[in-house]
Amino acid sequence: MSVVLVDAGGTNIGSVRYALQRLGVDAALTADAATIRRADKVILPGVGAAGPGMARLRELELVELMRSLTQPVLGVCLGMQLLCERSEEGDTPCLGLIPAQVRRFAEADGLRVPHMGWNRVQPRREHPLLRGLGAGDWAYFVHSYAVPVGDYTLAATEYGGDFSAVVARGNFHGMQFHPERSAATGATLLKNFLEL
């Protein structure tokens, strides 16, 4: 099985790669369109801001390629947000693969932004990506923007209201948390993605 990490400039690429190695998969880091198209699984990692993330995909001429992929694709953290239609962060048009608008967390008493640390993930519906995920399992988050809950939501997390922690639409999937930093929960979900 060939797995590629899209080199979109995310700073979490090394830790995602290491998490995959622990599962016995050596994922190639690439921005080569032909390599991405041939892969069995594609992962779009990302840490940072929506505008630079999309600018990097445009610069690499990967936007239309990403939209055309038919194999399982996983967006991680910012990578999940880039799968959506638009982000409030810089009013950035994104890939348009998940029908959602990414929104900044509202400032509120006792609610720090960014949302950073461990929080519970609550499954909303059954999906092979969630196999083995228990109600209230913990995952590690670092983000200021979130995807609202919708028909695409597989699992949600509460932080000043519910937001999407795991999404799927067709062959496109996303995890808002960092599976590579989420201990057993993250390893289980990454393994599930590799088995899709």
Image: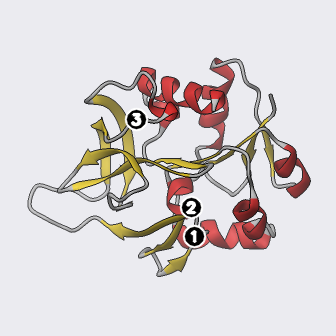
- The kind of secondary structure element at disc 2 is loop
Amino acid type for the residue under numbered disc 2:
Leu
Say if mark 3 contacts mark 2, CB within 8 Å. no
- The kind of secondary structure element at disc 3 is loop
The crowding category of the residue bearing disc 1, from other C-alpha atoms within 10 Å (few below 14, some 14 to 19, many at least 20), is some
Question: Label 3 vs label 2: CA separation?
Answer: 21 Å
In this view, the residue farthest toward the left is 109
Residue 187 place in picture, x, y as percent: 51, 24
Residue 15 place in picture, x, y as percent: 60, 34
- According to the picture, the residue beneath numbered tag 3 turns out to be 126
| Image height of 188 relative to 40, above or below | above
Q: What is the basis of the colouring in this image?
A: secondary structure
- According to the picture, the residue beneath numbered tag 1 turns out to be 96
Say if mark 3 contacts mark 1, CB within 8 Å. no
Q: Quadrant of the C terminus?
A: top right
Q: Is residue 28 left or right of residue 108?
A: right
Amino acid type for the residue under numbered disc 3:
Glu
Amino acid type for the residue under numbered disc 1:
Gly
Front-most of residues 183 and 124? 124
Seen at 22% across and 68% down, the residue is 106
Residue 47 can be seen in this image:
no
- According to the picture, the residue beneath numbered tag 2 turns out to be 83
Q: Quadrant of the N terminus?
A: top right
In this view, the residue farthest toward the right is 34
| Image height of 164 relative to 99, above or below | above
Question: Label 2 vs label 1: CA separation?
Answer: 6 Å
Question: Label 3 vs label 1: CA separation?
Answer: 24 Å
Q: Is residue 72 left or right of residue 167?
A: right
Residue 66 place in picture, x, y as percent: 72, 60
